[in-house]
């Protein structure tokens, strides 16, 4: 055996050959730390929105959940204006929604009517006072909208698409049950690079045209 074959490798020689690969992996792979920070940022935003809406609802003499029921009735259908589907939409139990609806009926903000063809089922609808109150709740969002509008147009669109992608991800993982976004719809065609397209309406979908709550939405296959 030659003297060169017997000579041990210099200290750190093997580690040096491993570093470039490890460095590439850590650079290319998504950072778990960023994911943790992103969830924390979403939590801060959720708390700010919840606090703002609690204050707006309290000034009008209703609870935050009652405000959500009113907004959902105003924006829908979907869902159909029945207690069971409202509960699924809002992610709460049916008795909880029933209590809120009863309170809103007593306040004169919601009315019940028997559904044609099935007198056992009751449809809900906003009264005139209910519509007026939703308009007040919507106006209270103007401060939040103004804060977002202070971002540049490109930043707004980038954040919007990222949030839609995150909603789609949460749907896939089962953390969101009801979503009617374009990115979770079976009629979404195209690609982000070549351009998205609505196959149902046969129209292009640039980023600002993507919808959060589309009435024609049908869930994409699992």
Image (tube, helix red, strand yellow):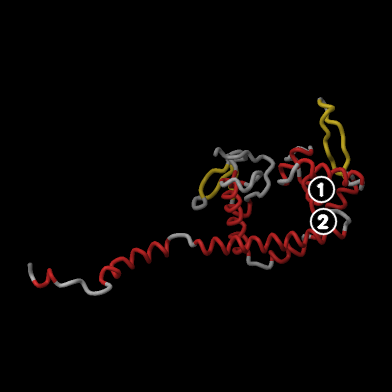
Mark 2: few, some, or many residues within 10 Å (few <14, many ≥20)?
A: some
- Counting from the top left corner in percent of width and height, residue 98 is at 82, 41
- Counting from the top left corner in percent of width and height, residue 122 is at 83, 34
Q: Which mark is residue 70?
A: 1
Split into 4 quadrants, where in the image is the N terminus?
bottom left
Label 1: state its secondary structure: helix
First in sequence: mark 1 or mark 2? 1
How many circles with numbers are drawn on the protein?
2
The vertical placement of 169 against 220, above or below, is below
Residue lying at the far left in this picture: please name it: 1
The vertical placement of 221 against 154, above or below, is above
Residue at (58% x, 57% y) in the render: 162
Label 2: state its secondary structure: helix
Residue at (38% x, 64% y) in the render: 24
Q: Locate residue 57: give its quadrant.
A: bottom right
Work out whether residue 39 or residue 148 is closer to the camera in this orientation and state it. 39
**Residue located beneath label 2 in the image:** 137
Split into 4 quadrants, where in the image is the C terminus?
top right
Residue lying at the far top in this picture: please name it: 117
Residue at (80% x, 54% y) in the render: 64
- Counting from the top left corner in percent of width and height, residue 171 is at 60, 46
- Counting from the top left corner in percent of width and height, residue 27 is at 42, 65
Q: Are the residues tagged 1 and 2 within 8 Å (C-beta)?
A: yes
């Amino acid at each position: 055996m030659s003297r060169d074959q017997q000579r041990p490798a210099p200290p750190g020689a093997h580690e040096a050959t491993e570093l470039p690969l490890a460095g590439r992996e850590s650079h290319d792979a998504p950072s778990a730390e960023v994911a943790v920070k992103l969830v924390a940022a979403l939590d801060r935003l959720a708390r700010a929105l919840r606090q703002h809406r609690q204050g707006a609802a309290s000034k009008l003499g209703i609870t935050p959940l009652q405000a959500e029921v009113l907004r959902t009735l105003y924006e829908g259908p979907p869902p159909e204006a029945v207690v069971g589907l409202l509960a699924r939409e809002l992610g709460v139990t049916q008795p909880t929604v029933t209590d809120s609806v009863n309170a809103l009926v007593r306040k004169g903000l919601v009315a019940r009517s028997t559904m044609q063809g099935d007198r056992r089922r009751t449809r809900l609808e906003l009264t005139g006072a209910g519509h007026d109150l939703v308009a007040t709740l919507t106006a209270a969002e103007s401060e939040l909208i103004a804060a977002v509008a202070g971002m540049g147009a490109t930043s707004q669109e980038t954040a919007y698409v990222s949030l839609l992608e995150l909603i789609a991800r949460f749907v896939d993982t089962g953390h969101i049950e009801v979503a009617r976004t374009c990115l979770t719809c079976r009629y979404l065609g195209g690609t982000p690079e070549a351009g998205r397209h609505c196959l149902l309406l046969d129209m292009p979908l640039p980023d600002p045209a993507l919808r959060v709550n589309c009435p024609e939405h049908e869930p994409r296959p699992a």
